[in-house]
Amino acid sequence: MFFQGEAKNKRLTKKNEMSKDLVKNNHIIKPFIVSSVIFIFVGSLIGSTWLAFILKTNIPLFDGSFFNFHRTFLLESGLTLLIMGIGFMIVPRFRNIPICSLKIIKVSFLSIIVSVFLAIVATFNIHEPTVNEKIILISEIFRTFGIFLFVVKIVDTLKVKPKLLRTADYFIGFSSMCLLIVSILNLFKLNDNSLTDIEIQLLFPIIMIFGIEYKTLPSFLGFIRPRNKLGIMSLLSLIAAFILGIATKIPSNYDALLSSIFNLLVIFSSIMFSISIYLHSNYESKTHILQSSSDKRERYLYTLYHTRISFYFLCIGAFLAVLYYLFDKKFMFYDLSIHFIAIGFIGITIASYIPMMLAPILGKPIVIRKFNKIPLILITVSLVIRTIGMTYTSYFDSNGFSLLYALTSTSGFLIPLAIIIFILLLYKSIKSNK
């Protein structure tokens, strides 16, 4: 009995040591999250102001170049940094190994920050055009270098064979390669503001989210394993979509057709993936979870609502992109498609995962309450109002200013408000656990 007790204590000590090793370097991810939230918040404010200008709202005028920061802050810096931070932290945890190569992570982060700073300098047009072009080139070089380090680190970590669900690694690895390829295309100025180009850039976070959800979501919702064959079909559809997206860069008479097939593949992939992770199934453990502790119940419902709604937005966003090409590239479909995917799918999914990410970084649990769903409600309301307003102004009243213009313009500012409330709720939860 004595030796058995001693052996048990040794196992517990070893397990605790492993747990400490797993979380001891998680602080390295903090700058990624903090800086990305700042960039996303500022980018959202700029985008909301831009929407107000488009809809003729009378607010103080900014120089037109100011609106270039919307894409720079949201897509090329904020969203990229956030998903990179998530990848740096979560992929090692999938293998039960600690975060290492801290210097590589720091250099990767600083490279992206320097890239953003140089992009800001170039956007203000304070130099000659030739000087600005050189600054932009150097900015893209820094960004590509930072992303290259990220890909090297992720691929190196993926070499460690996981105990189960290897398919998740294929999503994550392909997502990382997509980011690097898109960055190289940007370096050689092969990207523009076309809908397909923006969707190609959004594929990086979409596929990374699929990889993380494939590994984690079934267990969150009460299942052990996702359906592997459907997961593979989803991945293959995304690979085909990415190849078609790249093919649209070659001038031809089939760009609209290729872009439409691209979006149909994204829809098909999303449906296959949601089925593979039992997203819309009747969960056997649902009754048990709903009768359990308040924290467990709220966390379950929080994850379930966010995930289901986000997938609806992803499918609708891709469908709107198909309508964009069917209806002679009408701006309404362009705008709604991008925001349904970027805010509706990616934004809501990130909101559902950040509380779980912050827990190991801070070393304390993040309690989920009913009012944590307020940001989800604000985002959904914002996108619904945007859809109604854009539809009306596009088809019924495109002249002059109206109350609906003002309401639609205001809807954009609900996104920054949702971010502020989300941060305050997280802060309140962290303070209550001290």
Image (cartoon, rainbow, N blue to C red):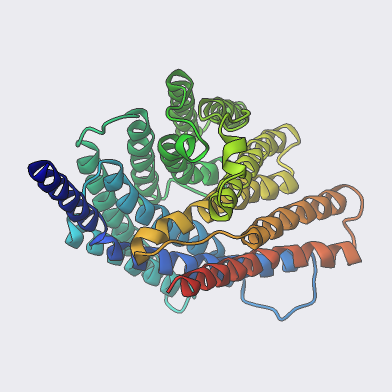
Give above or below for 189 relative to 51: above
What residue lies at 48% left-to-right and 58% top-to-bottom? 355
Counting from the top left corner in percent of width and height, residue 109 is at: 30, 63
Give above or below for 344 relative to 59: above
Camera-side residue of 413 and 296: 296
What residue lies at 87% left-to-right and 62% top-to-bottom? 404
- Total numbered labels: 0
Counting from the top left corner in percent of width and height, residue 310 is at: 61, 44
The answer, for residue 255, to whether it is visible in the render is no
Camera-side residue of 359 and 90: 359
Quadrant for the N terminus in the image = top left
What residue lies at 23% left-to-right and 48% top-to-bottom? 153
Give above or below for 161 relative to 28: above
Quadrant for the C terminus in the image = bottom left
Counting from the top left corner in percent of width and height, residue 197 is at: 52, 43
Counting from the top left corner in percent of width and height, residue 379 is at: 67, 57
Question: Hey, which quadrant is residue 158 in on the image?
Answer: top left
Residue that lies at the very extreme toward the front in this rendered image: 1
Residue that lies at the very extreme toward the left in this rendered image: 3
What residue lies at 41% left-to-right and 64% top-to-bottom? 33
Instruction: Please indicate whether residue 242 sits to the left or right of residue 374 in the image.
Output: left
Question: Hey, which quadrant is residue 324 in on the image?
Answer: top right
The answer, for residue 146, to whether it is visible in the render is yes
